[in-house]
């Protein structure tokens, strides 16, 4: 019988597996990933690996989420300061991230393999939940700075899914049109699904303006 791990130990081992997996992906690509080599590097048994992941594909998807979460935390901290035009700031950050990812997909086998797997896999609730958590962090940070935003998390997640399909077909576009299409998608979509709500002072000014217009008539 295999060793029973505590939850803390499981989290530590899972992170170790993913970190070693990333290194092997960079070296060989996910198609050539050896679970036996990975477990040797991570310091666990082959059977131990399958107590964490039922398949190699499940590991790859977890790594995608893990790496995205690492990068998104720094992005959230920067976006929390953008209170003048929150939707525009999110659109710009999302566009930059997706352009960087598209470039890696074109030039690095690891990212091409990952994108092919992501596109073959049905959208999962875990990804949606992770993204909703990021948006909740942003909304809380904006509120602390006196700005309220109406956010449609499902709509924004749909933008991410659509962008993934677009990146998977990037070789069908002439280069300038790919980035232009990606910008149109992220900018229009983000502005549709993130709406800055007027503050009390702005509402008061708007009401005064409406009353003045009514008097002038």
Image (tube, rainbow, N blue to C red):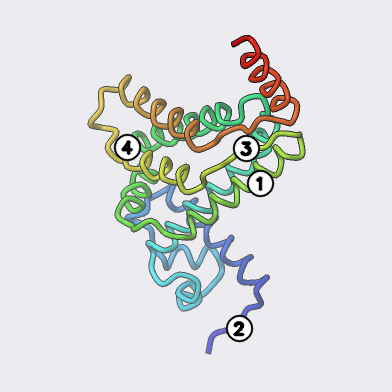
Instruction: Say which element carries label 4.
Output: helix
- For the residue carrying disc 2, how many other residues have a C-alpha within 10 Å: few (<14), some (14-19), or many (20+)? few
Residue with the mark numbered 4? 166
Height in image: 208 above or below 3? above
Distance between the alpha carbons at the discs numbered 2 and 4: 43 Å
> Quadrant of residue 188 in the image?
top left
Distance between the alpha carbons at the discs numbered 3 and 4: 28 Å
Q: Which residue lies at the image location 38% right of the left edge and 56% below the top edge?
A: 123
Residue with the mark numbered 3? 149
Residue nearest the viewer, comparing 104 with 196: 196
Count of labels in the image: 4
Residue nearest the viewer, comparing 184 with 209: 209
Quadrant for the C terminus in the image: top right
Q: Nearer the viewer, mark 2 or mark 4?
A: 4
Instruction: Say which element carries label 1.
Output: helix
Asked if disc 3 and disc 2 are in contact, CB closer than 8 Å, the reply is: no
Distance between the alpha carbons at the discs numbered 3 and 1: 12 Å
Instruction: Say which element carries label 3.
Output: strand
Asked if disc 2 and disc 1 are in contact, CB closer than 8 Å, the reply is: no
Label placed on residue 4: 2
Distance between the alpha carbons at the discs numbered 1 and 4: 27 Å
């Amino acid at each position: 019988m295999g060793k029973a791990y505590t939850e803390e130990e499981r989290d530590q081992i899972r992170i170790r597996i993913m970190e070693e997996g990333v290194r092997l992906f960079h070296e060989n690509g996910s198609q050539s990933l050896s679970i036996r080599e990975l477990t040797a590097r991570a310091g666990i048994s082959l059977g131990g690996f399958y107590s964490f992941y039922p398949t190699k594909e499940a590991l790859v998807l977890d790594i995608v989420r893990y790496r995205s979460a690492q990068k998104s935390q720094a992005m959230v901290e920067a976006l929390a300061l953008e209170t003048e035009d929150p939707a525009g700031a999110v659109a710009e950050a999302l566009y930059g991230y997706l352009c960087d990812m598209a470039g890696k997909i074109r030039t690095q086998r690891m990212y091409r393999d990952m994108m092919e797997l992501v596109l073959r896999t049905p959208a999962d609730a875990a990804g949606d939940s992770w993204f909703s958590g990021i948006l909740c962090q942003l909304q809380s940070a904006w509120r602390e700075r006196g700005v309220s935003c109406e956010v449609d998390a499902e709509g924004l997640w749909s933008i991410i899914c659509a962008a993934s399909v677009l990146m998977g077909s990037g070789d069908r576009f002439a280069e300038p049109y790919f980035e232009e299409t990606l910008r149109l998608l992220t900018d229009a979509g983000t502005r549709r699904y993130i709406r800055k709500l007027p503050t009390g002072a702005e509402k008061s000014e708007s009401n005064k303006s409406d009353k003045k217009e009514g008097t002038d008539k």
